[in-house]
Image (tube, rainbow, N blue to C red):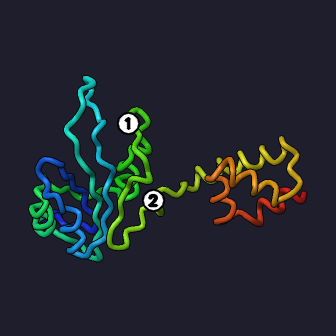
Amino acid sequence: MAKDNRARAWCMLAYPESAPSNWMELLQEEHFPFVVSPLHDLDTTEDGEIKKAHWHIVALFSGKKSYEQIKEYTDKINSPIPQKCADVRASVRYLIHMDDPEKYQYNREDIRAFNGFDADDYFKPTFAVKKQMLREITNYIHDHDITEFGDFMTWCTANNEEWFDLITDQYTLYTTSLIQS
């Protein structure tokens, strides 16, 4: 059986010195969702040398695309060899080195999304992380003798955006029940 070289998600690179100045617009005109990293101009080699500046791109398609089809897009922006994206979540998070603390940490706010790509979905905490956050919330509520949900949410708004997002997204009932008990 022949190996399928098609995929719905592809990773690409663009370099400032070789990409046309309007390379993002050129990709946007193709009408597929994609996301672009901040300019990676502070990445280093193992020897501490600064790597050549580049952008990472993660592109999604409604159906599988072959390498040859993707190469048509990358050729337009003078991008080197595209690669099938093994894991979209990991690739999007890599745009800022989120899960690679030994690498330079780029700002999430500098990620650019096009054509309906929702990058925020890929930064939501995993189930295991949510459970750990709920343990932390539970301990905080008990340790600080929190008795009012509104006061706690006001504190979260000012001090812990991740807790606020988790509680308002899924765990309002859990948190209010915990505070009332």
The answer to whether residue 1 of the structure is visible from this angle is: no
Q: Nearer the viewer, residue 22 or 174?
A: 22
Q: Secondary structure at mark 1?
A: loop
Name the residue located 20 percent from the left edge and 55 percent from the top edge.
Answer: 83
Name the residue located 19 percent from the left edge and 52 percent from the top edge.
Answer: 14
Q: Residue furthest top?
A: 47
The answer to whether residue 156 of the structure is visible from this angle is: yes
Q: Position of residue 47 (x, y in %)?
A: 25, 23
Foreground label between 2 and 1 = 1
Quarter of the view holding residue 51: top left
Question: For mark 2, does the 10 Å Cα neighbourhood hold few (<14), some (14 to 19), or many (20 or more) residues?
Answer: some
Question: For mark 1, does the 10 Å Cα neighbourhood hold few (<14), some (14 to 19), or many (20 or more) residues?
Answer: some
Measured Cα–Cα span from mark 2 to mark 1: 19 Å
Quarter of the picture holding the C terminus: bottom right
In this rendering, position of residue 105 left or right of residue 18: right
Q: Tag 1: residue type?
A: Tyr
Q: Secondary structure at mark 2?
A: helix
Q: Earlier in the sequence, mark 2 or mark 1?
A: 1
Q: Which mark is residue 104?
A: 1
Q: Which residue is mark 2?
A: 122
